Amino acid sequence: MDRPALYDKDPMDELIQRGELFQEGTGIYTFGPLLTALIEFFERQFLKLAESCNAKSYRFPTLISAEYLQRIHYFNAFPHSLSFVTHLREDLDVIDDFASNARYEAGGLNTPPEAFSKIHSLLSPAVCNHLYFALADKPLPGGELAATAVGSCFRYEAINLDSLERLWDFSMREIIFVGPKDFVLKNRESARARMEGFFKEIGLVYMVESANDPFFIGEFRKQAAFQSAFQLKFEIRAALPFKDSTLAVGSYNYHQDFFGRNLNISLPDDSPAHTGCVAFGLERIAYAFLAQFGIEMDNWPAVVKDGLT
Ligand code: 5GP
Ligand code: ZN
């Protein structure tokens, strides 16, 4: 945070004027070529990080199972931000009625709630959960695993969904570690050290701060101090000079054996696996970069300009 930033405006208006950003709905945005190229540049760095951790690439679904989310107590942790998925009930009358009468009005679709199925799936709120679900109820092959994936994540917030600072539908790149405690912590630390080098190289103004996240502390979630005390979560907070504040663009997480215990993922000695992840919000990192350097490419650091394809 010691370096001064070069730019001090909110890039949102200019991005919209230049056709680089289109708001489709609340918290839903389409990105143009410049933002896309910038996100792809950051993605390449994250992929290099993944490679240095020997992480194998995975592809995870956008939908997520309600049954598995229940097993990790997700409904208790973040009820307000969940996004539910339904479809019309498999009943010909319901489907015909919808086809003839469905209309979008200011308050939303006019379809009665009884026309919709019960909920078995949600929109995924994070990437790494899918890996833990795939590993559930069996021994972890080889006793340790490093994986990486990018995915769409959905977190609904009642307010502040009109900027790239907070999106309902955003993308996250994660590098995920499953194995013994030491394996997870060692990898989390080397990922942090490597990213520190990269952020310095591009001159990003940021800090890493210990943070609280009630999700994976489960039974300890009322004790806000727990997570800080055990250094379970660190956030990468980039400066937003135009509002003299910071924005979390990523996090370094250690979940202890929370997922290993609740999902029954076992190590060769029969103890539950520990897990951790390094997560980057792709839209946020691009937004924070533009908030610090502006949208004129001439003012960008050479390593970023040269790194765009
Ligand atoms: P975490 O799992 O630490 O809560 O989230 C990982 C990263 O995803 C955050 O550091 C942030 O960059 C990104 N992220 C989380 N919530 C949102 C959101 O509402 N909007 C956007 N654009 N990114 C988010
Ligand atoms: Zn994660």
Image (cartoon, grey):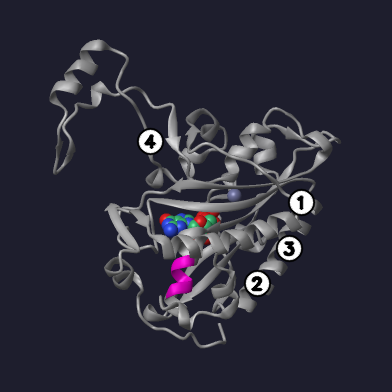
The location of residue 150, given as percent across then percent down, is 56, 48
Residue 189, numbered circle: 3
| Depth order, front residue of 29/69 | 29
Which label lies toward us, 2 or 3?
Answer: 2
The location of residue 223, given as percent across then percent down, is 56, 55
The residue under label 2 is which amino acid type? Phe
Task: Name the residue: 52% across, 64% down.
Answer: 249
Which of disc 1 and disc 2 is earlier in sequence? Answer: 1
Q: Is mark 4 within 8 Å of ligand 1?
A: no
**Secondary structure, magenta segment, majority class:** helix
The residue under label 1 is which amino acid type? Asn
Whether residue 212 is visible to the viewer of this picture, yes or no, is no
Q: Secondary structure at mark 1?
A: loop
| Depth order, front residue of 165/60 | 60
Residue marked by disc 2: 198
Residue 84, numbered circle: 4
Quadrant holding the N terminus: bottom right
Task: Name the residue: 66% across, 62% down.
Answer: 231
Q: CA distance from mark 2 to mark 1?
A: 18 Å
Q: CA distance from mark 4 to mark 3?
A: 35 Å
The residue under label 4 is which amino acid type? Phe
**As drawn, is 73 to the left or to the right of 22?**
right
Q: Magenta part of the protein: which range?
A: 286-290
